[in-house]
Image (tube, helix red, strand yellow):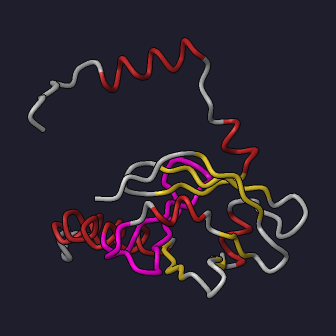
């Protein structure tokens, strides 16, 4: 399994492309190839980038459980796939972001197009630099969140 890590600051060029950092690309699993699947985040103004093998596992584990004869499940599936895009690397290691996503994420091609690609384990989150900086928690809030999310977990040394 890939383990993307680190914050990587980039720029969107005038054509809406981002040069994917070599360090981050090296962290991708070989089976991912030269393609990522991008999905707008449900919670933030960001695009979550999944290596294709991770995306396929996510879809297989979750969406196949949805009942096609349940209206809410049907609507969820439609909404889930509405904000998905395949992203491929060009010969220079860049990915082209569709204009629709640039608009949604408030990314301006060229000047003012600062973005962060943040490694998050099996995926990478892409958001504007301003948005990313705005999500950072204070020390006390960070401690409280860590305790709330991680404090109740059972740690198994054999995992």
The quarter of the rendered structure image containing the C terminus is top left
**Residue 109 is drawn in which quadrant?**
bottom right
The one nearer the camera, 146 or 45, is 146
Taking depth in this image into account, of 45 and 8 the one nearest to the observer is: 8
In the rendering, at what x and y percent does residue 75 appear? 36, 69
Occupied quadrant, residue 154: top left
The x and y percentages for residue 120 are 45, 48
The residue at the point 34 percent across, 58 percent down is 2
Q: Is residue 130 above or below residue 128?
A: above
Total labels drawn: 0
Q: Is residue 91 above or below residue 114?
A: below
Per the rendered image, the range of residues in magenta is 29-53
Q: Is 139 displayed left or right of 103 in the figure?
A: left
Q: Can you say whether 90 is above or below 107 in the image?
A: below
- The residue positioned 39% from the left and 74% from the top of the image is 78
Residue 90 location, x and y as percent?
61, 86
> Residue farthest to the top?
140
Image x and y of residue 117, in percent: 60, 55
In the picture as drawn, the residue positioned furthest to the left comes out as 158
**In the image, residue 102 lies in the stretch drawn in magenta:** no
Is 41 part of what is drawn in magenta?
yes
Q: Which residue is located at x 51 percent, y 66 percent? A: 25
* Side (left or right) of 72 relative to 88: left
Residues 90 and 47: in front is 90
Q: Quadrant of the N terminus?
A: bottom left
Compared with residue 107, is residue 53 higher up or lower down, i.e. above or below?
Answer: below
């Amino acid at each position: 399994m890939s383990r993307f890590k680190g914050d990587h600051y980039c720029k969107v060029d005038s054509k809406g492309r981002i040069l994917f950092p070599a360090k981050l690309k090296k962290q991708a699993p070989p089976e991912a190839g030269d393609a990522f699947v991008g999905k707008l985040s449900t919670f933030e103004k960001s695009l979550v980038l999944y290596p294709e093998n991770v995306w396929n596992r996510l879809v297989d584990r979750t969406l196949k459980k949805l009942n096609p004869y349940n209206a809410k499940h049907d609507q969820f599936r439609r909404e889930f796939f509405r904000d998905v895009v395949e992203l491929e690397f060009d010969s220079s290691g860049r990915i082209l972001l569709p204009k629709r996503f640039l608009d949604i994420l408030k990314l301006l091609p060229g000047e003012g197009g600062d973005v962060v690609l943040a490694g998050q384990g099996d995926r990478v989150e892409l958001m504007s630099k301003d948005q990313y900086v705005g999500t950072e928690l204070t020390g006390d809030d960070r401690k409280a969140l860590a305790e709330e999310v991680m404090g109740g977990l059972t740690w198994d040394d054999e995992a």
